[in-house]
Amino acid sequence: MGDPLISRDDAAEALGMVARAAGPYLDALPHLPVRDPAHEHLLEQLDGPLPEDGDGTITAVADLLRIGTKAATHSSGPRFFHFVVGGATPAAQAGDWITSLLDQAAGLWLTSPLAARAETVVLRWLKEMFGLPASYGGVLTPSATFANLTGLACARHWWAAEHGADVTADGLAGLPRMPVFSSGYVHASSRKALQLLGLGRDGVRTPTRDDAGRLDLDALDRELARSGPAVLIANAGEVNGGDFDPVAEMADLARRHGAWLHVDGAFGLFAALSPRTAHLVRGIERADSVAADGHKWLNVPYESGFAFVRDASVLGRAFGSWNAAYLPAPDEEFVNYNNLGPESSRRARALPIWATLRAYGRDGHRAMVERHRNLAVHLGRIVERSANLELLAPVTLFVVCFRYRPPGVPEAELDGLNRRLGEELVADGRVYAGTTVYRGVVALRPAIVNWRTTTEDVDLLASVVEEIGARLTGR
């Protein structure tokens, strides 16, 4: 087969094959096990020597469809509760197919006015949805990790300027260590961002008041009084118990001490959509930078995140000014988003966001947030009614933190029992939920964020946990 130019007429047929496979796959998805061990042998068929001449477009696509639809982890289905992983709404998934079809070079207005304008529009829509001021700057990123990196890079630029330095041009040499404070809820993605920025993964100071990691505001006040210019990371949603840092109170402290407030709202930012949960993120409109994920609760395909910054000009100062003659100069109207974030080569990730926001609007996404919270409360009540399960944290949003604790099992054996249960749960494959350590004990922490998830799926999770637990204990 060789050169793709020879088989260029196969392009439409190959895409048609995917489209024809999509209907049956999506119809079956709500009923499929998350992972089917019976099909994992198909993974071996991905391997083999690199073809010399190639098998051709149709053969390659057919094989990938056959293997993928059987052997994939069906994480876009309603029974994947591990980590915080949304699915993809129909509009978002179609928007993502359009993104691949058009294959825009989305970093520059010159290369794609379509992508640049779509990004500008969705950033405005997202600010409206979250209640952020319209004046904030923003940029789409591949993930919340990159969004945290973006916000904290802007914080680093601000902090260096407070010391009379231009960190973009000259780096960190000669500067003291940047003080960073957070609660015990600080996420690994924020630490990773600090690591990549040369600020140190383990340099975050966490004044806490209990073993859950809740912030000690008085201790933070004292720390800030003697730290000089500093950066605060507020966590709008903690991954184990679902708790929130007191964002408004942290904003007060930031203003009092002249600090930069960054909000990691990877999933918790979406609490702003519902009057029932908006109090959890009160104060985000006063933050200096805000980060969130799209491929979590917005239910758009991977990879999708967004970062917002109060002073829009800082984005350009932190990420622009490349001194490359072939690149167009910054322009307020014709925005070059590769000057505003860490990526140069960018796909048009605004298109699936545009599609889902246009399709379902503010009310549709609020309904999803409220439904998932209702499902989490429902699961929490199942746990509380069970003689064998123990709820470990209040249900705040969509995370339900609990463990298997049947009568008669000694406390010293519970961690080992729950680790085995978590392993068996993943191996079983009917539903997916993993373990964590919360307040010193091993626990399950299913997260309910998929638009397809129903009461039936949540009930199945609880029954499978009970079933596997009974098998492990012989009860």
Image (spheres, rainbow, N blue to C red):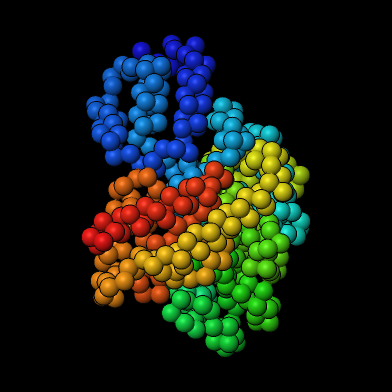
Q: Work out whether 249 lies above or below 48.
A: below
Q: How many marks?
A: 0
Residue at the location (60% across, 48% down)? 298
Residue at the location (69% across, 35% down)? 113
On the picture, is 182 further left or further right than 69? right
On the picture, is 309 further left or further right than 37? right
Q: For the N terminus, which image quadrant?
A: top left
Residue at the location (65% across, 64% down)? 277
Tell me where residue 102 sits by quadrant: top right
Q: Nearer the viewer, residue 145 or 107?
A: 145
Position in image of residue 420 (x %, y %):
27, 59
Q: Nearer the viewer, residue 281 or 473?
A: 473
Position in image of residue 241 (x %, y %):
48, 67
Q: Work out whether 425 lies above or below 277.
A: above
Q: Work out whether 469 lies above or below 80.
A: below
Position in image of residue 322 (x %, y %):
58, 50
Residue 153 appears anywhere in the view: no
Tell me where residue 357 sits by quadrant: top right
